């Protein structure tokens, strides 16, 4: 087990409908590298996870409510996908405010699958090279992003991947990028 992320605080912004593997696997990689993570959501209690958007896949306990957090509370941010999860986040003013505020810090953001929907709503994608699940690419282009179809894309503070199939590469990339950011803090 490596410890290159020891002392790093990572917020994981997720809501009901989060794709379980897209939260669980990156969080495991972050923990394995020594990071501390907190699940931030729209409400206290638990969020309901899904597999393939449709199949109930258990729940995750919520550590903090997005209305009560600040970008200053975290060194990095993870936005997992699933269709329902980011659709709820992008309709919540506190979640959008938090994401915009966090992006404005320049600190790293890892995002996968449908997760970039929230970035588009926060209006932080102008000129950003990014990838995502195919069905939201038009939305991202309209938000000003340069959308590509690649396993992992790193552009400045953003690390993005397309789908659960990309998780091994995505997890390695977020650990590496978050570690670089930690060296600069």
Image (cartoon, rainbow, N blue to C red):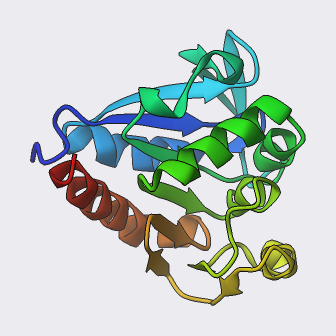
Which of 146/31 is in front? Answer: 146
Q: How many marks?
A: 0
Q: Position of residue 145 (x, y in %)?
A: 70, 80
**Which residue does the image show at 68% across and 70% down from the upper left?**
125
**Which residue does the image show at 82% across and 72% down from the upper left?**
136
**Which residue does the image show at 52% across and 34% down from the upper left?**
71
99 lies above or below 94: below
Q: Position of residue 40 (x, y in %)?
A: 59, 26
Q: Position of residue 108 (x, y in %)?
A: 42, 55
Residue 130 in view: no
88 lies above or below 52: above
Q: Position of residue 95 (x, y in %)?
A: 74, 35
- Is residue 104 rendered to the left or right of residue 1? right
Looking at the image, which residue sits at the far top? Answer: 45
- Is residue 1 rendered to the left or right of residue 148? left
Residue 136 in view: yes
Tell me the quarter of the image containing the C terminus: top left
**Which residue does the image show at 19% across and 37% down from the upper left?**
34
Looking at the image, which residue sits at the far left? Answer: 2
- What is the quadrant of residue 175 in the picture? bottom left
Looking at the image, which residue sits at the far right? Answer: 91
108 lies above or below 113: above
Which of 152/164 is in front? Answer: 152
Tell me the quarter of the image containing the N terminus: top left
Which of 8/165 is in front? Answer: 8
């Amino acid at each position: 087990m490596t410890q290159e992320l020891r002392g790093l605080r990572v917020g994981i912004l997720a809501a009901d409908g989060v794709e379980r593997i897209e939260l669980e696997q990156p969080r495991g990689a972050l923990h394995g590298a020594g990071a501390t993570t907190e699940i931030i959501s729209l409400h206290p209690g638990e969020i309901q996870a899904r597999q393939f958007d449709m199949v109930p896949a258990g729940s995750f306990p919520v550590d903090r409510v997005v209305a009560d957090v600040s970008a200053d509370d975290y060194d990095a941010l993870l936005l997992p996908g699933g269709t329902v999860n980011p659709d709820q986040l992008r309709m919540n003013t506190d979640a959008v405010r938090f994401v915009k505020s966090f992006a404005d810090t320049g600190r790293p953001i890892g995002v996968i699958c449908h997760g970039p929907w929230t970035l588009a709503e926060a209006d932080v994608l102008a000129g950003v090279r990014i990838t995502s699940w195919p069905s939201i690419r038009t939305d991202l282009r309209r938000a000003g992003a340069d959308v590509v179809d690649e396993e992992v894309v790193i552009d400045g503070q953003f690390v993005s991947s397309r789908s659960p199939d990309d998780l091994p590469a995505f997890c390695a990339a977020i650990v590496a990028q978050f570690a670089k950011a930690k060296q600069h803090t």
